[in-house]
Image: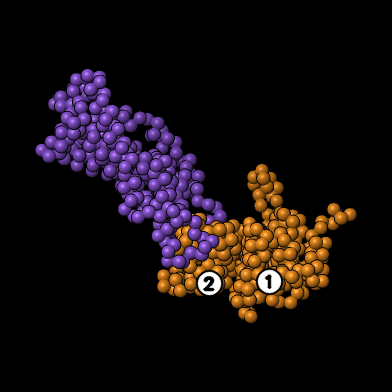
Amino acid sequence: MTHDALAHSDSAAGSEAARSPDGAATPETVGAAPGLVRPPWSRSVIGLWPFAVALLVFVGVWKLVVVLSGLPPFVLPPPESVAARFVTAWTDGTMLPHAATTLSEVVLGFAVGGATGLVVGYGLARSRLIERLVSPYIVAAQAVPILSLAPLLALWFGNGLLAKVIIGGLIVFFPIAIATMVGIRSVDAGLLELARSLRANRRQILTTLEIPAALPSIFGGLRVGVTLAIVGAIVGEWAGADRGLGLLVNLARASLFDIPLMFATLVTIALLGIGLYLLVVLVERRLVGVR
Amino acid sequence: MTATGRLVADGVRVSFPGPGGASVERTVAIDGLTLAVEAGEVVALIGPNGSGKSTFLRVAAGLLTPERGEVRFDDRPIREPDPRIGLVFQEPRLLPWRTVGRNVTYPLELAGWPRARRDARLAELLELVGLEGAADVRPGQLSGGMRQRAALGRSLALSPDVLLLDEPFSALDALTRERFNLELLRLWEATATTIVIVTHSIPEAILLADRVAVLTPRPGRVAAVVPVELPRPRAIEQLDTAIGLRAAAEIRARLEPPERVA
C-alpha cells in the first residue's frame, strides 16, 4: 500500500511536469520541482526493480530452507523442481483447464458480488431505512464463515459454476458494499449544496459528484474483493467440483501425491491473484487518476 | 445597466431545529428581514456572528424556503435555485477531481450546454477572473486565492443577473483580499450584475457597496441601511476620505448592540 502511494505521487509529478511546458499554468499554480523530471521509460524500470528483488529474496530463502532443513521433497520441494513442474503442467495441458475454470468462477463471482455490493452500498449510504432493514443480514452473513456455508451451498446449487459464483459473490459483496457506503457518505456536504444551487438532478449528482467522490474508496473495496473472489472460488471447489485449481491442489496432494504439482498449482493461484489485483489497480489509475 | 436583477426581501423569517432536536423550540435565525436591492446595485450585508447573513443569502439563492415572507427576484418569489442568480460560497467548493476548466464550466454542463459552446464560454470566463491558461490545472495545485477566482468564474458561467457572495474573501490574507475586492468591482462594472455580498469587514463593505445593510444580532433583521456616497470607480484611498470615514462610523454605531452601549 505504501509503495503504491509513492508510485502514485511519482506519476502525479511526472504528468504535471509534462503539462507545464505548454506554458499554460501561471507561475503561482505550478508546484512541480524541475528536478523530479525523468524520462518516461525510467519510471517503469525504477518501479519494477523492488518486485524483482522481492522475488529473488523469496526464492533464495526458500532454497536456503530446503538445503538447511533437509526436509524431504514431498514435504518441501526445492524451487527449481516446482518451477520445472510448473512449466510442464502448463505445457502438457494439465493446468490450463483447471486455471480456466477457476478464472471464470473468480471473474463471475467478483462481478456478481461487486455489482450487488455497489448497489446495496449506495442504498445503505443514502437511506436509513435500507440500512436498518438490510445491515443485520449483511453482518450475519459475514459473521458465518464462508468455509462452513460452502458445503450447504454446494448441496443446494450443485457441483458446477453456480455454487462457486454464489460463494464468491457472498464473500466479495461485503467489502465492496461497505467501501461504497463509506465512499458515498464521504461526499462533501458543501459540494452537494453547490450542485443543488446549480439545479443538478439526481442522476447528475450521482454521476458528477457521488461516483467520482466515492471512487477511491470503492476501489479500496474492489482490491480487497478481487483477492477474496479467489478465496471464494477455491473454497467452493473444495466443497465439491470436477475441475479447478482448488480441486487440483487436493488431487495433487492426496490422489496423485505430486507435491511439486501442488506447489505449482499454488503458484498459479498466486499469479492469478496478483494478475487480477494489478488489473484492478490499473483500472483504478485510469479512472481515479491524479487528485 | 440591465433592467433585471432587482431583489426584494419582504418580512423573511427562517428558523432551524434547536440543538435538542425537532421537539425542542427552534432557533430563529432571521425574522422580519426586509430589504430592497435595485438592479445593478451593490449591497453589502454586515452584522455580528449569528445574525443570519448566510441564512438570508441561502433564501435568496433558493436553497432555503422561508417560514414566512419571501424574497422576490424581479417581482417573482424565489422558490428554488435560479440560473439567473449566481452564488459564491465562503469556500471555493471546487470538485477536486476536475480541472479548473471543468470546474468553471460545471454549471454549463449541468445545464446541458454542448461541449463546443462550453469551451468557448470557458475562455471568456477564465479571462474575466484572471485565470487564463489555468484551465487544465487541478484545484489542488492552486493557491487559495486562485481557487476562489475559479469559484467566482464558475458563479459567472451562466451570466447571472444577480451575484450573491457569502464572505467570499474571508479566507484570504489582507493584501490579497484588497486586490480581490478591486477586481470584483472591475467585474461588476464589466458585467452590470446586481451584487449582494455578506462580509464581516467594514472597510470591505464601504469599498464595494452602494449601500450597507446592517443586521441585528439573532434573530437577524435590517437595523439600518447606510448609503456610501463615494464616487466610482472606487479606490482604497477613498476609505480615508471624510465620506468614507463617516460611513464607517455610522456602520459601527449601528452594529453596536444598544444594551452594551447603555
**Which color has been applied to chain B in this rendered view?**
orange
| Mark 2 nearby-residue class (10 Å; few <14, some 14–19, many ≥20) | few
Mark-to-mark CA distance, 1 and 2 = 22 Å
Q: Which residue is nearer to you in this view: A16 or A195?
A: A16
Would you place residue A54 above or below residue B100 in this image?
above
> Dot 1, how many residues are within 10 Å of its Cα: few (below 14), some (14-19), or many (20+)?
many
For mark 2, what is the residue? B127
Query: Given the image, on which type of amino acid does mark 1 rest?
Result: Val
Q: Secondary structure at mark 2?
A: helix
Task: Tell me which corner region of the image, top left, top right, bottom left or bottom right, holds residue A246.
Answer: top left
Please state if B66 lies on the left or on the right of A225 as rendered: right
Task: Tell which residue pokes out farthest to the front in this image.
Answer: A35
Q: Which residue is mark 1?
A: B42
Residue A79 appears left or right of A37: left
In the image, are marks 1 and 2 on the same chain?
Answer: yes
Q: Chain of mark 1?
A: B
